[in-house]
Image (tube, helix red, strand yellow):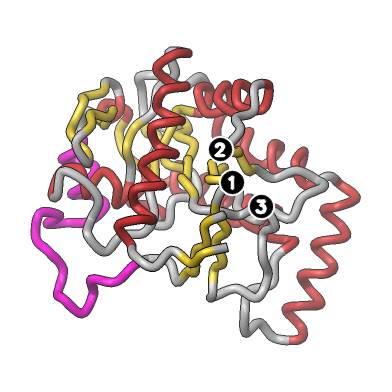
Amino acid sequence: MEKIKTIQDIQRMEQGILDYVANICEENELRYFLAGGTLLGAIRHQGFIPWDNDIDISMPRPDYNKLISIVEKKPDERYRLLRVTNENDYYYPFIKVVDTKTKLIELAREDRIDDMGIFLDIFPLDTISKNHNKALRELRYVNKWGSRIAGSVSFPIGISYFRKIEHYLWYWLLKMLNREKSLNRVEKRLYAEKFGNTGYIVSTYGLRNENEIIEYEAFAQTVELPFEGKMYKCPIGYDKYLKQMYGNYMELPPERERIAPHDIEVYMD
């Protein structure tokens, strides 16, 4: 396999995954939104943040679940969906779509996901309590237990001997209980309510925790915005969302902070 050396080549292949997912969404009338740093890039750079090496979207939970079903019923030759099951070594609580012609190694972890390649992260958007404090408690509960269930198969670099023992205990317990079913039970605390037009919604498992909680109106409609020469769906309330997530988002960070979020090596088949 040949090592991919430039971030631009990684970004180009990530956009290929985005096109694959966006086309499925368009064909099946599923809602999706550019999210996180990808949405920030669309607004500030009309494409990728120059030093960014990942790509994110979010989907309302009903559409997120339908996407899983569609992709698994009709697999693609190049792109594959990864999610938690009781049999695999996938340790993220949200889904990824990967380019199977690539092999990605996360250098900050001593464990490896066998099928990991250049990826697109997809985060579920869930309806949450109309009360912000209750919404925050619910989010913290789901993020904690969802991440523990999904991550019970993983061993990050540098954890102590006792943490490794704890991981082994969780691994075998959740293997017996079934990781996939356990994750579904935890997440139902959030999506028992219909994804609708009242209260707060949240990008579950998003890294910015309480800043991911936002009024539904910000995602009530989509607007198409340019990203790397193509048009993609974004939330109508992108300004409110980005201010909540990043503050003065149009201001570039100091040069010392312009680094890729993932320490990775990527190889092309």
Q: Which residues are magenta?
A: 238-260
Residue in the picture at 34% in, 67% down: 260
Q: Are marks 2 and 1 in contact (CB under 8 Å)?
A: yes
In the rendered image of this protein, does residue 67 appear above or below residue 258?
above
Quadrant assignment for the N terminus: bottom right
Residue type at mark 3 is Asp
Residue type at mark 1 is Thr
Question: Where does residue 90 sit, x and y in percent of width and height?
Answer: 68, 53
Q: Can you tell which mark lies on residue 143?
A: none
Q: Are marks 1 and 3 in contact (CB under 8 Å)?
A: yes
Residue in the picture at 57% in, 54% down: 269
- Residue at disc 1, secondary structure: loop
How much space separates mark 2 and mark 1, taking CA atoms?
Answer: 6 Å
Residue type at mark 2 is Tyr
Q: Can you tell which mark lies on residue 79?
A: 2
Of the numbered discs 2 and 3, the one sitting upstream in the chain is 2
Residue at image mark 3:
115
Of the numbered discs 1 and 3, the one sitting upstream in the chain is 1
Residue at image mark 1:
100
How much space separates mark 1 and mark 3, taking CA atoms?
Answer: 7 Å
Residue in the picture at 18% in, 34% down: 226
In the rendered image of this protein, does residue 192 appear above or below residue 87?
above
Q: Residues within 10 Å of mark 3 (few under 14, many from 20)?
A: some
How much space separates mark 2 and mark 3, taking CA atoms?
Answer: 11 Å
For residue 178, what is the image quadrant? top right
